[in-house]
Image (cartoon, helix red, strand yellow):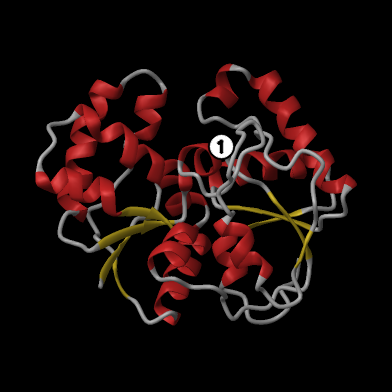
Amino acid sequence: MRIALFIPCYINQFYPQVGIATLQLLEKLGQDVFYPHDQTCCGQPLANSGFEGDAVRTYDLFVRNFQDYDYIVAPSGSCVYHVRHHFDIIPQSAEVSHVREKTFELCDFLVNILKIDKIEARFPHKVGLHQSCHGLRGLRLGQSSELMGPGHASVVRQLLAGVEGLELVELTRADECCGFGGTFAVAEEAVSVKMGTDRLSDHLKNGAEVITATDMSCLMHLEGLVRRRNLPLQIKHVAEILNSKNKVSI
């Protein structure tokens, strides 16, 4: 398979190590990974701010960059969700449909496409899993507590559970929003901060040393609160943990 690596703009700018970990992980699993150099943002920030019409050219560029690959993989549930569910405002060609259908969040791709049960990795720390809203409720990467009936097994928990030495801590409110929400964190700063602080308190109370997630955007929000409060917590994207071989200094 020819796999295209889609690296969201904020990861490219602020957390390049997450993109590198994603690439290395896919290559270790024997995949042919390509990075389209003309790629830019998926258009989500414009759309979330009420300017989706202005994002159309960004959507078109995204399709042109990725239409020739078998799969598009990204270390971001929110960006993947946006491609899958918001590209319906542009004319639906075979190329658009292909890109929307074949764009996957990293853990979803590993478990449901590559059929990976366990990653050979080592990370001997107590880890709290933050389940981001787009991944959990949008992409169904797990079962949210407000839904009744048969659940979706968490692909993220499945992969983390197989990491040597890693102890997943159980949170009191396991699927509560962190309060980031993109521009929500700017427009409703006080509410956003309170929600984020509540999430950190839950992780601390249950003994987490590290917080991980599929979305670096949520982790960026939480990391800012951790730094301002000098809390004894570290932030790691799930790709960094799955790509670990030895004990990581935290």
Q: Nearer the viewer, residue 247 or 107?
A: 107
Q: Nearer the viewer, residue 96 or 43?
A: 96
Report whether 231 appears left or right of 97. right
Q: Amino acid at mark 1?
A: Cys
| x and y, in percent, of residue 232 in the image | 85, 52
Q: Nearer the viewer, residue 83 or 60?
A: 83
Residue shown at 48% from the left, 73% from the top: 116
| x and y, in percent, of residue 139 in the image | 46, 44
Q: Nearer the viewer, residue 193 or 134?
A: 134
Position above or below: 53 against 73: above
Can the viewer see residue 150?
A: yes
Q: Quadrant of residue 178?
A: top right
Disc 1: CA contacts within 10 A as few (<14), some (14-19) or many (>=20)? many
Report whether 179 appears left or right of 75. right
**Looking at the figure, which quarter contains the N terminus?**
bottom left
Q: Count all numbered tags in the image, as a single digit.
A: 1
Question: Which residue does the numbered mark 1 point to in the structure image?
Answer: 133
Can the viewer see residue 42?
A: no
Residue shown at 72% from the left, 33% from the top: 196
Residue shown at 69% from the left, 20% from the top: 191
SS label for mark 1: helix
**Looking at the figure, which quarter contains the C terminus?**
bottom right
Residue shown at 64% from the left, 65% from the top: 160
| x and y, in percent, of residue 183 in the image | 51, 25
Position above or below: 144 against 124: above
| x and y, in percent, of residue 15 in the image | 52, 55
Position above or below: 207 against 221: below
Q: Quadrant of residue 19?
A: bottom left
